[in-house]
Image: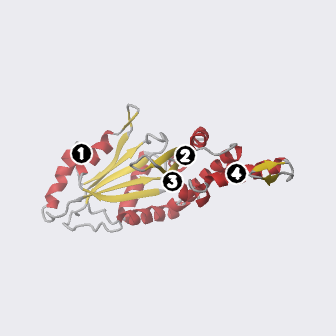
Amino acid sequence: MIAKGKSISHGTAALEYDLAKEINGEAAATEIHRHELFGCTGEEMVQEMKPYFVDFPNVKNNCLRFEVSPSVEESAGMTDADWAKLGNDFMQRMGLMNHQYIIVKHSGTEKNRRQAHLHILANRVSLSGELYKDNWIGKRATEAANSIARERNLVQSKDIGKANREEIKQAMDGVLARMQGFDLAGFSRELGKLGFKVREARASTGKLNGYYVEARSGTEYKASEIGKDYTLAHIEKTQKKLKYNSISRNYGNTLKPKNGGLHL
């Protein structure tokens, strides 16, 4: 399970987005739970939060926003009650049960229609008038998610990342071993057929600086996060090595490199 968190100033816009989420023209948002909020719209609910902001006029980021995402497999059988329990458990571990907040479930994302997840918007000021400290809030959200995952025997975020990178690496190795020579366009095309999208990273001048690979789960990784051998500076050499190893196995190790080529 993965969780993200940050403090924001655009609470109304964020909540309106959460409540009105659509995927391919179909409604994808379901309100799961709310605490001490009574409005019908995002704007009305954030207006209810504003009286608590008065004592902190210099605080720009007065709302907290979280995203909580179990894996597709883990969330497949979850009911709305299960999602509400998960969201409230997360808020308790974050120390935010005494704050106004609303939990909205999205049934998927544009990249992955099956990746259901929660969006939570909370007042940064508690009902008792205390300002919630937002330092390291992203790290604390991850720790809260990992704590829940350990108790529920779910997959922790670090394990999901490791599994994603290993799956990408295996797919990349397979594609590289089949290529006659490396070119990024062909490499991207073949990875795409396997469900892994490649995005080029270019400077403002148009120069190609690197690339990213998106896991089937929708999480994107730099090539360097997959491994040094897969960066633009080294991937051509990696392709030749994998190709040589593949052909060598097929020919019973009788293949030998010679003059920059491969010879029997």
CB-based contact (under 8 Å), mark 1 and mark 3? no
Task: Give residue 198's position: percent from left, percent from top.
Answer: 53, 45
Query: Which residue: 39% across, 66% down?
Result: 140
For marks 2 and 3, the one nearer the N-term is 2
- Secondary structure under badge 1? helix
Quarter of the view holding residue 241: bottom right
Type of the residue with mark 4: Lys
Type of the residue with mark 2: Arg
Type of the residue with mark 3: Tyr
Residue underneath mark 4: 240
Mark 1 crowd level (few <14, some 14–19, many ≥20, 10 Å Cα): many
Q: Does the rendering let one see residue 118?
A: yes
Q: Residue 68 vs residue 255: left or right?
A: left
Residue 221: give its label.
3
Mark 2 crowd level (few <14, some 14–19, many ≥20, 10 Å Cα): some
Task: Give residue 115's position: percent from left, percent from top.
Answer: 48, 45
Residue 237: give its label.
none
Which label lies toward us, 1 or 2? 2
- Secondary structure under badge 3? strand
Q: Nearer the viewer, residue 176 or 86?
A: 176
- Work out how far the residue at label 1 is from the one at label 3, CA to CA, in angstroms: 33 Å
Which label lies toward us, 1 or 3? 3
Residue underneath mark 2: 216
- Work out how far the residue at label 1 is from the one at label 4, CA to CA, in angstroms: 55 Å
For marks 4 and 2, the one nearer the N-term is 2
For marks 1 and 2, the one nearer the N-term is 1
